[in-house]
Amino acid sequence: MWQEFLEKFEALLQLMQKFDLICVKTQSILYKQTTGTKSDRLFYVPSLLKKKEGDEMVSLDKLAKSNNTAVFYVNFDGFLPEGLYYRLVVRIVHWSQQRSHDKGYNPRLFYQQVKVYIDQNHDAIIRILPEKRSCIQVVIYKLKVGGKHLEPSPSVCKEILQLIKENLLDIGHKWMKRVDFNVCVLCNVCPEENLHLHKLKECLVSTPRCGPDDGMDTCKVRRLFGKDNRNQAFQDTAVQGNSNVPWFLRPLIGVYKDIPSPILPFHIMTEVCVLLDPPQPRANDWRSVACKVGYDCYINYIMNMMNSPTMCVMHGWSEKGLSLDDFKDCMIAINRHDVVGLIEEHLKL
């Protein structure tokens, strides 16, 4: 069916990526680059997945009740367009691949369900809830540590919650302006068959009542999704000694204008910062660069303390021995062709 469009094939692929219909499999690009073969790129197309008997599905019944999970629901109050769900899956798969890099973790896609990598200790499952098809269920779970079930990290739970919300709001703003949703948690008082949900924002500030004399226990919800010190992860690391903290994260780096860029002239680097500093729904901004150089554990600290997170991370780029070409390849991989164009225009490459 594509024969008569082969000349415009790349343009069609870019158009489908722009509309969040497909997501390139990162490892297919890496394999082609590292081996020099002419292997075709592979793409994830969640909307084409069909329900098949015998499909390997991730059982959530026992998992959702385990101590090592955090579960929340995105309730669309009776109407969830499938197109919105599939666009969300494409974005989450893209984000997960940026997090996993070359660690060998691939997302696992099934009919209306996806399992993705978050970090070395956490995975997530996102699916349309079979019992209530206008609802998306998100399960964040922590891998066993020494055979023990431990609660997921609160910072990871809040990060995934924010990721889901930001992407749904962005998708809704662009494509489905009249679709509204609420983030909810399952009532732990009412019988399971009732599938009674409470709004998460209410559970974080009060105890929802269920019946005349029962109230939901919200301790776990507040512990995993409530407010805390966003710099705690960095502080826990920093107390081990300053030698564990990369030099560019120390307080003096706040005045980044006094420090020249290691791979780009300063005037070009500042323009790159203007493009990459603003947070993007799919995290294809300075955070992807931070993950590339292995500084993802410092993201919250950089976000809160530095004038330009991009400039700070780029100083770590040279420490890893990465070049300007590596940086351009990274920008292409996360679909930031605007940054590549800026660099090429200034340097006349």
Image: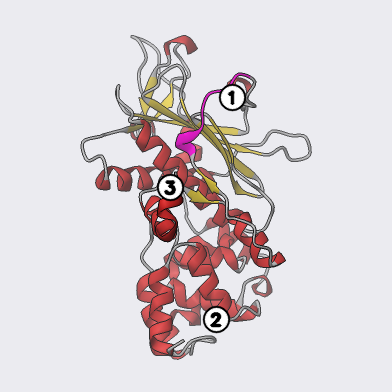
Q: Are marks 3 and 1 in contact (CB under 8 Å)?
A: no
Which of the 4 image quarters holds residue 21?
A: top left
Residue depicted at x 64% and y 57% = 39
- Name the residue that disc number 2 marks: 324
Q: Are marks 1 and 2 in contact (CB under 8 Å)?
A: no
Residue 15 falls left or right of residue 95: left
Residue depicted at x 58% and y 33% = 69
Between circles 1 and 2, the one closer to the viewer is: 2
Residue 32 vertical position relative to residue 4 in the rendered view, above or below = below
Of the residues under marks 2 and 3, which one precedes in the sequence?
Answer: 3
Residue 325: percent from the left, percent from the top? 56, 79
Q: The N terminus lies in which quarter of the figure?
A: top left
Closest to the observer, 115 or 122: 115
Q: Which residues are magenta?
A: 46-53
CA neighbours of label 1 inside 10 A, class few (<14), some (14 to 19), many (20+): few
Residue 21 falls left or right of residue 60: left
Look at label 2 and name its amino acid.
Leu
Predominant secondary structure, magenta span: loop
The total of numbered circles placed on residues is 3
Of the residues under marks 1 and 2, which one precedes in the sequence?
Answer: 1
Which of the 4 image quarters holds residue 200?
A: top left
Q: Are marks 2 and 3 in contact (CB under 8 Å)?
A: no
Residue depicted at x 47% and y 10% = 193
Of the residues under marks 3 and 1, which one precedes in the sequence?
Answer: 1
Q: Is residue 48 visible?
A: yes
CA neighbours of label 2 inside 10 A, class few (<14), some (14 to 19), many (20+): some
User: Which structural element holds mark 3?
Assistant: helix
- Name the residue that disc number 1 marks: 60
Give residue 190's mark: none
- Name the residue that disc number 3 marks: 163
Look at label 1 and name its amino acid.
Leu
Q: Is residue 93 magenta?
A: no
